[in-house]
Amino acid sequence: MTAAAAAAAGLAVLAAALFALASAVQQRTAAAVAEGPGGSLRLVAALARSPRWWAGTLADTGGYVAQAAALGLGSLLLVQPLLVTTVLFALPLGARWAGRRLGRADWGWAAVLVVALAAFVVTGEPTAGADAAAWRDWLPAWAVLGAAAGACLLGAALRRGTPRAVLLALVTGLAYGLAAALTKGVVDLLGDGVAAVLTSWSTWLLAAALLGGTLVQQAAFQAGPLGASLPAATVGEPVVGAALGITVLGERLRAGGAEWALVAVLVAAMVAATVALARSAAAAGAAP
C-alpha cells in the first residue's frame, strides 16, 4: 500500500469514528421529538433548539471533512468500505451508555469485519480512476438513484415505525453514497481556486445531496429505533459510493480469476458483520 493510500485509510477510519458519535447523539435527540403535524419542518425546528443535536452535527461535519480528505488521497473503492467501521465505534459507545459489556457475539462479528476489510484491501488492491466525470456520464446513475430514492420515499410516506425508518435510511445511504462520489471531483477542483468550486454544477449537487441526506436521516432517526436505520444507512452509503466509483469514475479492483470469488465472499462477510454489529450497537445505545 502506498503512503497516500495508507493516509487515506487512516482518515477514513477517523471519519467512521466521528460518524458513529454523530449518529448516536443525533438519533437520541431526534427520537425524543414526537411525530405529528408539521412533519419535517417541526422536526427541524425542534432539533435546531437542541445543543446536543448541534454537538452531533459538529461531529458529523468533522467526519465529512476527514472523509473528503481521504477521498482526495484514495479511491472510493478503498475509502468507502472502510466507513463501515462506523459500527466498530458505535458498538462500544452504545454499550458504555447502556452500562453493559460487549458479548462474545459482538467480539466475533467485530473480528469478522476487521479481517474481511483487511483481506478485501489486500486481495482487491483498489485502484483509482478519474476524480470527476462529465454530467452526461452521470445520467444513467442519476436515473437509477432517482428511481430508487423515489420508490423508497413513496413507501416511507405510506408506512410508519420500523419499515418507514428502514426506507428513509436507504434514501440516506443513496444520498450520502452519491455525495461521496461527487466529493472526489469537488476536492480536485480546490486546486483551481474558489471560483472554480463555486461555479461547478457538481458542487451544488453535492450540497443538495448532503442537505437532503441529512434531513432524511433525521426523519429516519425519528421514525424508528436506531437498529432499524443504522444498518441500512451504514451499508448503503459505501455500496452506492463504490458502485459509482466503478461505473462512473472508472475505478477497478485488481483481483483476477479465483480471487473474484474470494472478493465476493469478503463483501458478503462485511455486509453480514456490519448489519449484526449495527443492530447490536443500536440495541445497546437505545435512548431510555
Image: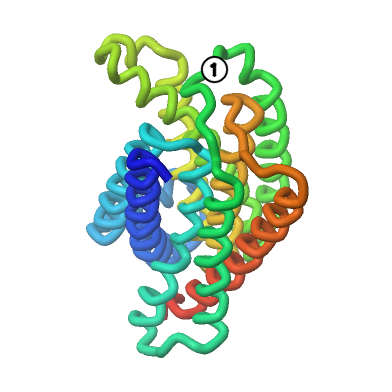
Q: Residue at x 26, y 50 (%)?
A: 58
Decide: few, some or many residues near mark 1? Use Cα within 10 Å; few <14, some 14-19, many ≥20.
some
Quadrant, the C terminus: bottom left
Q: What number of labels is visible?
A: 1
For badge 1, the amino acid type reads Ala
Picture layout, residue 48 above or below residue 22: above
**Horizontal side, residue 66 vs residue 129: left or right:** left
User: How is the structure coloured here?
Assistant: rainbow
* Residue where numbered disc 1 is placed: 133
Q: Position of residue 225 (x, y in %)?
A: 54, 69
Asked whether residue 255 is in view, the answer is yes
Q: Position of residue 148 (x, y in %)?
A: 71, 38
Give 222 or 212, whichever is nearer the viewer.
Answer: 212
**Horizontal side, residue 130 vs residue 158: left or right:** left
Quadrant for residue 276, please give it: bottom right
Q: Residue at x 39, y 55 (%)?
A: 16
Q: Residue at x 53, y 26 (%)?
A: 129
Asked whether residue 33 is in view, the answer is no
Q: Position of residue 25 (x, y in %)?
A: 35, 64
**Horizontal side, residue 194 vs residue 138: left or right:** left
Q: Position of residue 57 (x, y in %)?
A: 31, 50
Quadrant for residue 214, please give it: top left
Give 145 or 134, whichever is nearer the viewer.
Answer: 134
Quadrant, the N terminus: top left
Give 237 or 75, whichever is nearer the viewer.
Answer: 75
Q: Residue at x 63, y 58 (%)?
A: 166
Picture layout, residue 49 above or below residue 230: above
Q: Which SS class for mark 1?
A: loop
Give 45 or 21, whichever is nearer the viewer.
Answer: 21
